[in-house]
Image: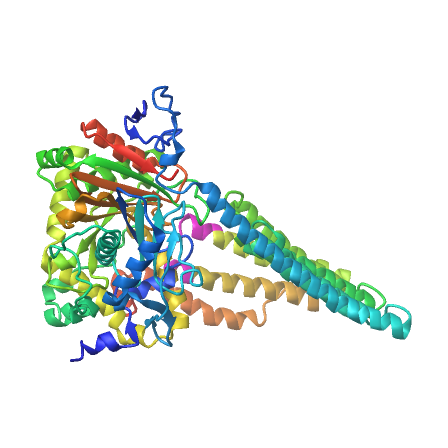
């Protein structure tokens, strides 16, 4: 019998190394004997995994063939009738989209939700661009869809990228940059340059600033549901006042408070009530007792 | 009369403990329980299949498949024949419905070993062990050995007892009635945030097990010196190992969490029951930060905790709490398609952080003397726990204690500490493993 020099446990004859500490077993009086192993060896297990992989590839191959047939038949009919490829390009690219999003995952060794989602997303984006190019003179409506898809992809990436490389601050920055960039891009396509500079940019700046301040307050010291509600009310108040000033400056040429005064009148009593509840321990106790979850 | 009809019934309700399992079963959390008998002769699969078919009518409540109802899952009688399969490198792999004819248990063989893997949806460790004992006895008889059943194993010629079909959680909750004001104070779902071992996780279908075989008399004498049972002693070692792992993995002592080991308690030993469904509860010895005791204080703490919390009235309270959740009108009337994801979410968030590990002790296994001559070893193990990462199952047979650790991480950090501790006490440990 062999013993592990590190742990002191008695090892079986099939142990090349100690299963507890991985120390190599070196006993010339007791050669390794794999025929005495207590469990089937993993090679057999890998054979099962390989069999599964072969079945998956077969399914992928059958799907690919089906999509190819679905694309080829309309193309042949189109060529026979029109002597060129015209309408058949639509089913061709639709089949291409189906192939990338359904058949390709079957050929991959390891499937992850985000990987398959990204593949389907890229396929859909390419399909939309091609349909836009085929149906109109250039890159027109599809740019709105593509930019929205890109924003959604960034939001999804922030959630689904592996934990090892997912860091909080870069993800937050990516979200802010993607959202601001998206709105600026859309604004640049539909609005004039002056409107972007004097309206869209300041409004976005206000939203990002209020979000960041609130976010760091929540992270640092403003814990608890009551603080959160208070912060939300304060955010709503700040955003409405600043929006009112920016919009009135753009519309009338000078900054003044108009509709935001009504919002202020509604929000201020709520904020005062929240502060009183926060300070009065008895009221807080009563609320948590009656409305506990 | 009502109970007799159970045997002719085409379907059964899930017992109260089993209701949670269909929501959480996946390749990483298979909720299987394995009992393996190593014989002194090589297994003949044809004889094993014949033995399986012969004992099957004795256990009608195990010949079932899991089905979806509108409000709950249920067990439907499966009239197919189960079949034996060659063992896999990883024990407790998820049951493939097609491969396994829809049955919720697997009968596996490898060299000299017969293993039975049971889904917790049907029964607990006791049920799996009793079934495995009956199967092995019948296998040995069909192999030509004349073995007398001394009554420690089910008689396959007899009719199943109506009590074997019953969900005794509900039966005893009804018998004991509503809790008194004093008993109501317990809080079953405490706010424990237990420490969870960190480590590189193995692929979903790989589950590493290490069995440590230790002599019963040696471990008994050491545990006796602490005035503790073997379970209490092993739980104390497990807790000590978890404290050490937390010390290594969490650098900042201010961030230390509680360390808790879940210990299943077989309720059949406390309340009269012949149920073959799930009928066990858990007690969880918990140590809270910042100061953790050393081993000499840990054993008395574990001993006192387990003895206090396994008193029948305390266990009945836990049972009441468990049953009240499953029986509440709100839970009962939520459709299954909503219930499953909600349950899964609760179990994977707050439920998973309630304990840092599990140690299940099936106790000494009793088999007829004629059978002992042919059975070399008996081991058991729990299925992978993706949250706690490691779990242990213990049983005693023929002068040895078999401690099987299963893990879903690469590094056997807990096992190493536990077995090293046993060796430090002068208890020799023999190792078997699949890795």
Above or below — where is A24 with respect to B188?
A: above
Above or below — where is B269 with respect to B296?
A: below
Q: Residue at x 52, y 73 (%)?
A: A262
Give coordinates of residue A104: x percent, y percent.
65, 56
Q: Is residue B411 visible?
A: yes
Q: Quadrant of the N terminus of chain B?
A: bottom left
Q: Is residue A217 magenta?
A: yes
Q: Quadrant of the C terminus of chain B?
A: top left
Q: Is residue A198 visible?
A: no
Q: Residue at x 22, y 69 (%)?
A: B324
Q: Main secondary structure of the magenta part?
A: helix
Say which quarter of the image contains residue B60.
bottom left
Give coordinates of residue A46: x percent, y percent.
50, 45
Name, please, the residue furthest toward the bottom. Answer: B1
Count of marks placed on residues: 0
Which stretch appears magenta?
Answer: A216-229
Above or below — where is A160 with respect to B155?
A: above
Q: Residue at x 48, y 71 (%)?
A: A265
Give coordinates of residue A63: x percent, y percent.
65, 63
Q: Nearer the viewer, residue A4 or B368?
A: B368
Q: Residue at x 50, y 49 (%)?
A: A48
Name, please, the residue furthest toward the top. Answer: A28
State left or right for residue A152 relative to residue B417. right
Q: Nearer the viewer, residue A235 or A132?
A: A132
């Amino acid at each position: 019998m062999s013993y592990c020099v590190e742990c002191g446990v008695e090892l079986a004859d099939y142990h090349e190394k100690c299963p507890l500490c991985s120390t190599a077993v070196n006993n010339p009086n007791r050669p390794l004997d794999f025929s005495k192993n207590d469990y089937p060896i993993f090679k057999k297990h890998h054979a099962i995994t390989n069999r599964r992989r072969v079945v998956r590839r077969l399914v992928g191959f059958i799907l690919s063939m089906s999509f190819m047939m679905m694309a080829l038949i309309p193309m042949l009919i189109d060529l026979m009738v029109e002597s060129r490829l015209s309408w058949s390009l639509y089913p061709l690219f639709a089949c291409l989209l189906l192939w990338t999003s359904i058949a390709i995952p079957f050929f991959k060794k390891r499937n992850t939700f985000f990987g398959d989602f990204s593949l389907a997303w890229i396929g859909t984006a390419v399909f939309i661009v091609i349909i836009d190019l085929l149906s109109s003179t250039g890159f027109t409506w599809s740019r709105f869809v593509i930019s929205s898809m890109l924003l959604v992809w960034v939001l999804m990436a922030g959630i689904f990228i592996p934990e090892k490389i997912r860091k909080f601050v870069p993800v937050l920055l990516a979200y802010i940059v993607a959202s601001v960039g998206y709105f600026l891009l859309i604004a640049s396509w539909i609005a004039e340059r002056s409107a972007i500079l004097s309206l869209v940019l300041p409004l976005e700046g206000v939203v990002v600033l209020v979000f960041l301040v609130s976010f760091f307050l929540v992270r640092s010291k403003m814990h608890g549901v009551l603080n959160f509600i208070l912060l939300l009310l304060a955010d709503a108040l700040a955003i409405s006042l600043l929006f009112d000033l920016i919009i009135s400056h753009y519309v009338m040429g000078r900054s003044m408070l108009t509709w935001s005064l009504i919002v202020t009148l509604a929000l201020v009593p709520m904020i005062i009530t929240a502060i009183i509840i926060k300070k009065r321990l008895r009221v807080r106790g009563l609320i948590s007792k009656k409305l506990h979850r | 009369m009502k109970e007799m009809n159970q045997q002719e019934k085409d379907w059964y309700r899930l017992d109260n403990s089993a209701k949670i399992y269909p929501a959480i079963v996946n390749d990483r959390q298979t909720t299987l329980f394995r009992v393996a008998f190593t014989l002194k002769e090589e297994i003949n699969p044809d004889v094993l299949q014949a033995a399986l078919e012969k004992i099957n009518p004795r256990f009608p409540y195990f010949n079932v498949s899991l089905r979806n109802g509108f409000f709950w899952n249920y067990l439907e009688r499966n009239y197919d024949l189960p079949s034996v399969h060659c063992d896999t490198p990883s024990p407790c792999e998820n049951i493939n419905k097609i491969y396994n004819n829809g049955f919720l248990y697997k009968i596996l063989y490898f060299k000299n070993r017969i293993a039975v893997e049971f889904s917790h949806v049907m029964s607990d460790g006791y049920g799996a062990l009793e079934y495995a004992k009956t199967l092995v006895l019948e296998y040995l008889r069909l192999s030509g050995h004349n073995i007398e059943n001394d009554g420690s194993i089910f008689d396959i010629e007899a009719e199943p007892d109506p009590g074997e079909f019953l969900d005794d959680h509900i039966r005893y909750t009804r018998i004991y009635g509503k809790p008194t004001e004093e008993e109501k104070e317990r809080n079953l779902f405490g706010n424990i945030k237990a420490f969870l071992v960190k480590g590189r996780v193995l692929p979903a279908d790989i589950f590493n097990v290490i069995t440590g075989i230790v002599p019963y008399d040696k471990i008994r004498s050491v545990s006796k010196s602490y005035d503790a049972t073997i379970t209490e002693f092993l739980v104390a070692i497990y807790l000590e190992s978890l404290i050490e792992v937390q010390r290594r993995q969490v650098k900042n002592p201010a961030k230390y969490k509680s360390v808790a080991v879940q210990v299943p308690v077989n309720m059949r030993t406390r309340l009269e029951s012949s149920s073959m469904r799930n009928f066990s509860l858990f007690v969880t010895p918990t140590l809270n930060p910042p100061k953790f005791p050393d081993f000499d204080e840990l054993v008395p703490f574990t001993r006192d905790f387990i003895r206090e919390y396994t008193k029948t009235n305390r266990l009945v309270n836990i049972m009441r709490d468990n049953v009240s959740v499953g029986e509440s009108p709100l839970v009962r009337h939520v459709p299954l398609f909503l219930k499953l994801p909600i349950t899964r979410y609760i179990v994977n968030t707050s439920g998973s952080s309630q304990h840092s590990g599990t140690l299940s002790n099936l106790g000494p296994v009793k088999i007829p003397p004629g059978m002992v001559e042919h059975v070399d070893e008996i081991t058991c193990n729990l299925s992978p726990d993706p949250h706690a990462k490691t779990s242990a199952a213990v049983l005693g047979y023929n002068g040895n204690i078999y401690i099987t650790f299963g893990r879903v991480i690469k590094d056997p950090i807990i096992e190493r500490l536990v077995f090293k501790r046993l060796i430090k006490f002068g208890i020799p440990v023999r190792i078997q493993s699949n890795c």
